[in-house]
Image (cartoon, rainbow, N blue to C red):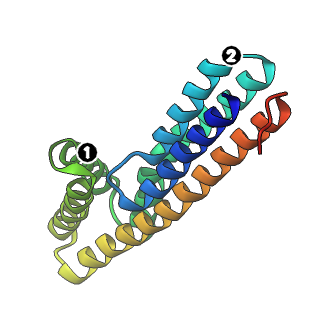
Amino acid sequence: MTALLHILTLIAMIAGLLSLLTLVIPGLTIIWISALVYALAVGFDTITIIAFVIMTILMVFGNLVDQLVMGSRARKSGAAWLSIAMSMVSAFLFSIIFSPIGGLLAALLVLMAFEFYRIRDLKKAANTSKEMAIGCVSALALRFLIGMIMIGVWFGWVWQSDAWFF
């Protein structure tokens, strides 16, 4: 039974990791929920709590990393804080309505529109949006790394338990 639990948890975590590449499915949350289900199945002890807290922190940070990395890239290219804030708000709203890809497109277009209105230079405004898009790709890579670390924490947690199957 423990072997089956390990295999199912690992499959769910790998599916979460791979879903990070789609930008649509919250892969870090899937990895975290897999760990939660595993913890509920095996019970909580000191190691479980420590590992689960680490995974929770990683999941929360990883889910915020898009805004942090994308916003910092846009800011480095000269975007105003107001433009970045409006871009992030539109990303959030349009992600709810049109999926994360719709949110990303809205963020880039709103940033470009606000920057064009502010500086009256389409080329510079487009460059700012390009930098934000590069930030999105960087954030994707960082989220993937965080997902791998989360799975590694789970492996360490399982290895420390008496129920090691692998």
**Residue 157 visible in the displayed image:** yes
Residue in front for this viewpoint, 61 or 165: 165
Q: Which residue is mark 1?
A: 89
Alpha-carbon distance for marks 1 and 2? Answer: 39 Å
The image quarter in which residue 116 lies: bottom left
Residue 34 position, x and y percent, is 54, 34
Residue 80 position, x and y percent, is 33, 59
Residue in front for this viewpoint, 164 or 105: 164
Mark 1 or mark 2, which is nearer to you? 2
Identify residue type, mark 2.
Answer: Gly
Helix, strand or loop at disc 2?
loop
Residue 55's place in the image compared with 98, above or below, is above
Going from N to C along the chain, the mark reached first, 1 or 2, is 2
Identify residue type, mark 1.
Answer: Val
Residue 130's place in the image compared with 161, above or below, is below
Residue in front for this viewpoint, 137 or 11: 11
Q: Spot the residue most to the front.
A: 1
Give me the disc on residue 43: 2
| Horizontal side of residue 159 vs 26, given as left or right | right
